[in-house]
Image: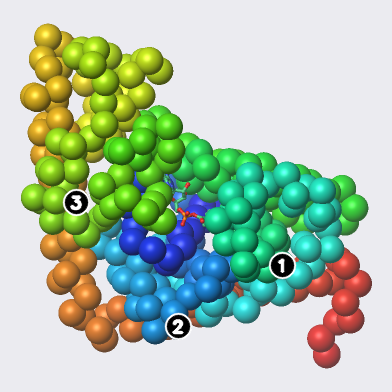
Amino acid sequence: NKVLFSGMQATGNLTLGNYLGALKNWVTLCDEYECFYSVVDMHSITIRQDPAVLRKRARNLLTLYIAAGLDPKKNCIYYQSHVSGHAELAWILDCFTYMGELNRMTQFKDKAAKHADNINSGLFTYPVLMAADILLYQADVVPVGIDQMQHLELTRNIAERFNNIYGDVFTIPEAYIGKVGAKIMSLQDPSKKMSKSDENPNGSIYLMDDPDTIMRKCKRAVTDSEGCILYRDEQPGIKNLIDIYSACTGKTPDETVKEFQGKGYGDFKPAVGEAVVSVLKPLQDEFARLSKDKAYIDSVIKGNAEKANYYATKTLRKVQRKVGFPDRI
Ligand code: TYM
């Protein structure tokens, strides 16, 4: 069976971008592959966190994976920090990654600019830990949004470099980018991606926003004065709303344009809001239901960490042997 790996950070409130760019595709692909979906809490501490808040958010995120439709009996849903192999492989891969490569990572540059008082070495080697996540499970496919493409490219380069020295150790992973929704933009500034850490809460739709809030944010979305609903770069706000509507309804952007031909923004924006509500409401209800079932979530956490650990250790032992660490007796 082919293997799928992906992960999400439990930092900040998840947005519609995280859902449409990643989680939604995870659910579509989950029957086709042997899947590992991680809550990447080790990545989260590259930025200062309140421990109690991080713990709570990590649990909420894991619960949300299940609420979205992933099946913890078939898909491995677990905390990254519960599988020590991630850190162990990351160290080895650090020794096969060049400073110059990491210096070119745009996400590092953005985050370093934003957190100038805490440019720690974990933030710098963040992409290597991500490579370890993926390579540890010999993943064939990694469904992510466009913003993670550069990290994935680096992962492939590290894996190829390692394989060139030691033989075929790692599977070279491919990114899976959805046809629509791979880059959802801010509703207030369509030149910026929708982000968990946006200061303007009207720019992002959060997965836990109530229907009124979602409708209000969609109606207030920044557009233009063209007045027509066309899918083109000259109308970035409308283009983004077409992406959102299409991703939520399963239509193509072309079909959406046809559907709203001759209509104005006053019709389109509320329709986008309704499409988003109809996707998020069931997710929220299921999340609320599952959150109450402490014993069930606990059992998922324990059982799946063991499963992940089994596969992780297999790769790790192979890698350790290749680089020359002594055998365990
Ligand atoms: P994170 O937590 O920032 O985002 C999780 C996923 O959501 C996607 N995404 C978006 N997609 C479309 N439009 C947007 N506006 C948008 N914002 C976020 C991201 O592309 C991502 O797929 N480094 C990763 C987490 C990670 C990971 C991994 C992913 C760690 N290890 C291994 C894949 C494989 C991150 O910070 O994603």
Q: CA distance from mark 1 to mark 3?
A: 37 Å
Disc 2 target residue: 51
**Residue 70 position within the rendered picture, expressed as x and y whole percent measured from the top left:** 32, 59
Would you say 262 lies left or right of 5 here?
left
Disc 3 target residue: 280
Res 162 seen here = no
Q: Amino acid at mark 1?
A: Ser
Callout 1: helix, strand or loop? helix
**Residue 140 position within the rendered picture, expressed as x and y whole percent measured from the top left:** 59, 47
User: Splitting the image into 4 quarters, where does residue 221 fall?
Assistant: top left
Between 177 and 47, the one nearer to me in the picture: 47
Q: Residues within 10 Å of mark 1 (few under 14, many from 20)?
A: few
Would you say 117 lies left or right of 66 here?
right
Q: Is residue 324 above or below residue 130?
A: below
User: Splitting the image into 4 quarters, where does residue 10 fall?
Assistant: bottom left
Residue lying farthest to the front in this orientation: 117
* Mark before the other along the chain sequence, 2 or 1: 2
Q: Residues within 10 Å of mark 2 (few under 14, many from 20)?
A: few
**Residue 126 position within the rendered picture, expressed as x and y whole percent measured from the top left:** 64, 61
Between 246 and 268, the one nearer to me in the picture: 268
Residue drawn where x is 71% and y is 74% of the image:
88
Q: Which image quarter holds the C terminus? A: bottom right
Disc 1 target residue: 121
Residue drawn where x is 77% and y is 56% of the image:
169
Residue drawn where x is 53% and y is 73% of the image:
48
Residue lying farthest to the top in this orientation: 262
Callout 2: helix, strand or loop? helix
